[in-house]
């Protein structure tokens, strides 16, 4: 049996609402470490290089289909290789059970011989590595059906794998149907099935809905294989956590805790120091280079990249951004869709908004906000300033309270500040406006006209002192 990319079809069951989630969002669109459950399953499937991936959708199918389309187009996970894989979604109009969902999927696949891997869409820790041994043993044993099981400390609620004296699978017994002895079995079914296409069609065609729920159960294909002496086996997974499902927000949170600790442990093994590993949130696609320090309460999300020797003091949120070698983010910074180069010092309590690019050696102080701003090498904006839609030349210094007034109520305009400029405190630069190289702006000025290079711009009323005014007022 060949399970190469030319013969393997993957089916992902993602039609259910997830009633126990108590949410209007489809279960598979909830997130774990920033990634939706369906995308996490798609990533695991893509790593097997299958011929096709078919996703069975149902509840709010349009939302799930959009997520699948983004993945297939390489938008949500650009580092995952999806070349050569055909993606499709098929709709299960009525949710009549997992067996019925598999029937809907098989009807959309061609009749060519090969193998079919069926995955639940709500097991967010599943990986390619957890699935690969099943495919390898399937080939080695020339089986018609194989499925993954797991040994767990608390099997309550799961179907039990009942084996014969020789170790072969006898049946799967659901929790409600277990005898006292069967309930003690700790090997559980995980709902990951691999079968020849011919067997899958044959077994699914035999399903009946003679149960209280009037549903067609995918687990019944195991019973079909046993009754008809088809070569079948259950492989006990070496990664049981990777196969666990999330049926409620609480279960999803528990799985996220597992994955968060795995991620942090992997980065510590790579030379990253965490002030408090339990209090760091590191996303799945984040990259951290060695000798960096991650303070407590740090949240790194999306495609964030942290360079060598970076220090993050803590309580910061960094999304889809790059922090260069040796830079230091003090307490409580928010960086989003921005680039910070090497040897910068940011914060505390700075807000680096989308489109900001901070070059080497930039210093941003407390309560400073930048947006769509290019700050060249050595620029200093030390406190209480807003720099938006602007370019600031190398080594320029913006005093406390400097504001680039970029919005006129209708359109945004750009402020351009040359090299080696100095802007005095509490100044407003009304865009569009340009300060030439080495220009100065007097404190408290509202600048509405360009200031030539090496000139001083002042725009404030003359000070008048009225002697004795205070005494007269009283």
Image: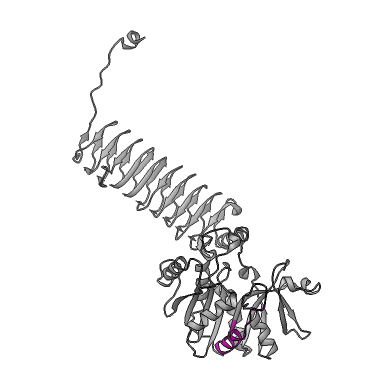
Q: Horizontal and vertical percent for residue 269?
A: 58, 62
Q: Horizontal and vertical percent for residue 462?
A: 23, 23
* Foreground residue among 129 and 29: 29
- Residue at image point 61% right, 76% down: 192
Q: Is residue 267 above or below residue 363?
A: below
Q: Is 206 in the magenta?
A: yes
Q: Horizontal and vertical percent for residue 130?
A: 59, 74
Taking 466 as reference, is 28 left or right? Answer: right
- Residue at image point 25% right, 21% down: 463
State which region is magenta. 194-211
* Foreground residue among 232 and 388: 232
* Foreground residue among 50 and 190: 190
Q: Horizontal and vertical percent for residue 20?
A: 61, 61
Q: Residue 459: in sight, yes or no?
A: yes
* Foreground residue among 155 and 104: 104
- Quadrant (top left/top right/bottom left/bottom right) for the C terminus: top left
Taking 441 as reference, is 400 left or right? Answer: right
- Residue at image point 48% right, 78% down: 53
Q: Is residue 209 above or below residue 283?
A: below
């Amino acid at each position: 049996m060949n399970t190469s990319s030319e013969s393997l079809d993957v089916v992902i069951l993602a039609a259910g609402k997830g009633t126990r989630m108590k949410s209007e969002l489809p279960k598979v669109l909830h997130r774990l470490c920033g990634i939706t459950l369906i995308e996490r399953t798609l990533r695991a499937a893509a790593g097997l290089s299958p011929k096709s991936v078919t996703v069975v959708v149902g509840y709010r199918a349009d939302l799930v289909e959009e997520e699948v389309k983004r993945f297939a187009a390489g938008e949500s996970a650009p580092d995952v290789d999806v070349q050569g894989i055909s993606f499709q979604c098929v709709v299960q109009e009525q949710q009549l059970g997992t067996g019925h969902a598999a029937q809907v999927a098989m009807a959309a696949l061609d009749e060519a011989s090969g193998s079919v891997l069926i995955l639940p869409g709500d097991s967010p820790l599943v990986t390619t590595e957890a699935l690969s041994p099943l495919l390898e043993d399937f080939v080695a044993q020339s089986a018609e059906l194989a499925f993954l099981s797991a040994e767990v400390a608390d099997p309550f609620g799961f179907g039990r794998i009942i084996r014969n004296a020789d170790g072969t699978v006898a049946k799967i017994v659901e929790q409600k149907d277990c005898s006292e002895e069967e309930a003690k079995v700790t090997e559980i079914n995980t709902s990951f099935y691999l079968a020849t296409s011919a067997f899958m069609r044959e077994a699914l065609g035999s399903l009946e809905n003679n149960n209280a729920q009037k549903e067609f159960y995918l687990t019944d294909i195991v019973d079909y294989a046993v009754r008809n002496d088809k070569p079948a086996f259950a492989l006990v997974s070496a990664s049981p956590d990777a196969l666990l499902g999330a049926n409620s927000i609480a279960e999803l949170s528990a799985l996220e805790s597992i994955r968060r600790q795995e991620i942090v442990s992997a980065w510590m093994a790579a030379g990253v120091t965490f002030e408090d590993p339990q209090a760091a949130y590191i996303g799945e696609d984040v990259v951290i280079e060695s000798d960096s320090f991650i303070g407590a309460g740090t949240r790194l999300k999306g495609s964030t990249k942290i360079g060598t020797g970076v220090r993050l003091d803590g309580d910061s949120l960094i999304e889809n951004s790059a922090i260069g070698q040796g830079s230091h983010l003090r307490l409580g910074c928010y960086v989003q869709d921005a680039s910070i180069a090497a040897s910068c010092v940011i914060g505390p309590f700075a807000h680096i908004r989308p489109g900001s690019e901070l070059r080497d050696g930039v210093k941003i102080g407390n309560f400073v906000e930048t947006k769509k701003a290019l700050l060249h090498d050595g620029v200093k904006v030390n406190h209480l300033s807003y720099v938006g839609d602007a370019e600031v030349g190398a080594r320029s210094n913006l005093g406390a309270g400097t504001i680039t007034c970029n919005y006129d109520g209708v359109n945004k305009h750009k402020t351009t500040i040359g090299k080696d400029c100095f802007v005095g405190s509490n100044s407003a630069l009304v865009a569009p406006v340009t300060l030439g190289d080495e220009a100065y702006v007097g404190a408290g000025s509202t600048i509405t006209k360009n200031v030539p290079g090496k000139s001083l711009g002042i725009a404030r009323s003359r000070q008048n002192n009225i002697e004795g005014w205070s005494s007269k007022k009283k």
